[in-house]
Image: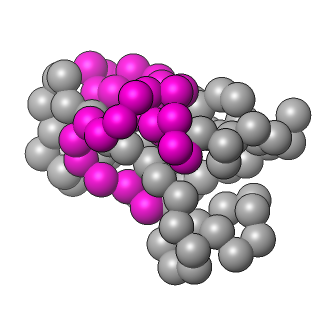
């Protein structure tokens, strides 16, 4: 269960979402819509702020990217990397 956010992706978040060091980006699981994932019928949403107990995190560029305990199951079988390609965020999943 690993979450990696590349430096380039973190910089994108900071610029596009006007984030400051110490801010949080939470990823959460939702049915349908949003960011496609390795889990059929599930997608990812994201929000600014901290909610719940952090289960897995990655701090990059002073921003804390995380899944809380309620949604951490999503990474039980996968490592997730958030990267930037051609100016767009991409979410790569690697089976463990």
All told, the count of numbered labels is 0
* Along the viewing direction, whichever of 75 and 52 lies nearer the viewer: 52
Extreme bottom residue here? Answer: 33
Q: Which residues are magenta?
A: 45-71
Image position, residue 94 (x, y; %)? 80, 42
Name the residue at 22% across, 41% down.
49
Image position, residue 46 (x, y; %)? 38, 55
Asked if one can make out residue 8 in the rendered structure from this viewpoint, the answer is: no
Q: Quadrant of the rendered structure where residue 65 is?
A: top left
Q: State the scheme by which the image is colored.
A: one colour
Name the residue at 26% across, 36% down.
50
Extreme right residue here? Answer: 96
Q: Quadrant of the rendered structure where residue 12 is?
A: top left
Image position, residue 73 (x, y; %)? 67, 43
Quadrant location of the N terminus? top right
Name the residue at 58% across, 67% down.
43
Magenta stretch holds residue 29: no
> Is residue 43 toward the left or the right of residue 18 in the image?
right
> Is residue 60 toward the left or the right of residue 3 in the image?
left
């Amino acid at each position: 269960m690993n979450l990696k956010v590349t430096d380039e992706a973190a910089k994108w978040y900071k610029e596009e979402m006007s984030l400051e060091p110490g801010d949080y980006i939470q990823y959460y699981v939702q049915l349908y819509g949003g960011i496609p994932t390795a889990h059929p019928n599930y997608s990812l949403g994201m929000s600014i702020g901290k909610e719940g107990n952090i289960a897995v995190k990655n701090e990059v560029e002073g921003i804390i990217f995380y899944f809380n305990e309620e949604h951490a199951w999503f990474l039980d079988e996968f490592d997730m990397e958030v990267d930037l390609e051609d100016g767009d965020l991409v979410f790569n999943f690697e089976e463990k």
